[in-house]
Amino acid sequence: MLKKEYIPYVAGGIAAVVAGGLALSLLDQGDSKRTEQDVIPSSDELKDGPQPLRVMVSGAAGQIAYSLLPLLSNGYVFGPKQRVVLHLLDIPPAMKALDGVKMELEDGAYPLLAGVSCSSDPVEALKDVDVAVFVGGFPRREGMLRKDLIEKKLPHL
């Protein structure tokens, strides 16, 4: 399914899985001291910049992803000049909420957001991605203990 070699990458406290060569270039950049001018690139810089990264986020309609997506879209994860195309993945019952997340991202006018697609099919969502961020899980229901939740999630890990 995925034909690239993937290795873990962490930036700003966010873990992701990144294609091997890309991870090395990201680690080389490593400058975390940014000014406002660095964070908000001009439209000319974006046109001349690198090709957009394709980033898949699972559980994209959930609360964790809701906090993560703006960080991916505004340059805090991959750098102030790296555009992204987000591939949002969630379960079929969450597709209506996922469409709402997509609209919010588009309304946010993030200059680095080059596109958004939504899917409930993992094969479709993972097609041609450079980075896969797996978040989300089974929500704890009333009366459930943490151990019940872990037992529910364990088979999927």
Image (cartoon, helix red, strand yellow):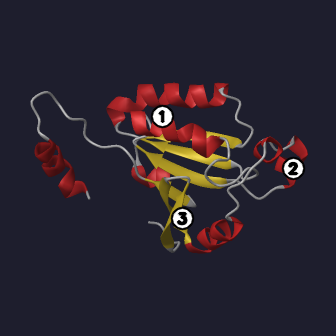
Dot 2 amino acid type: Glu
Numbered label tally: 3
Quadrant location of the N terminus in the rendered image: bottom left
Residue indicated by mark 2: 45
Q: Residues within 10 Å of mark 1 (few under 14, many from 20)?
A: some
Residue 95 in the image, given as x and y percentages of width and height: 41, 31
33 shown above or below 63: below
Q: Please say whether residue 62 is visible from this viewpoint.
A: no
> Residue at the spot x=34%, y=39% of the render?
91
Q: Residues within 10 Å of mark 2 (few under 14, many from 20)?
A: few
Is residue 26 found left or right of 119 in the rendered image?
right
Dot 3 amino acid type: Val
Residue indicated by mark 3: 18
**Residue at the far front in the pictured view:** 33
Whole-angstrom CA distance, mark 2 to mark 1, is 27 Å
> Residue at the spot x=58%, y=45% of the render?
86
Q: Nearer the viewer, residue 73 or 14?
A: 14
Whole-angstrom CA distance, mark 2 to mark 3, is 24 Å
SS category of the residue bearing label 1: helix
> Residue at the spot x=82%, y=48% of the render?
46
13 shown above or below 90: below
SS category of the residue bearing label 3: strand
Q: Mark number for residue 1?
A: none
Residue indicated by mark 1: 66
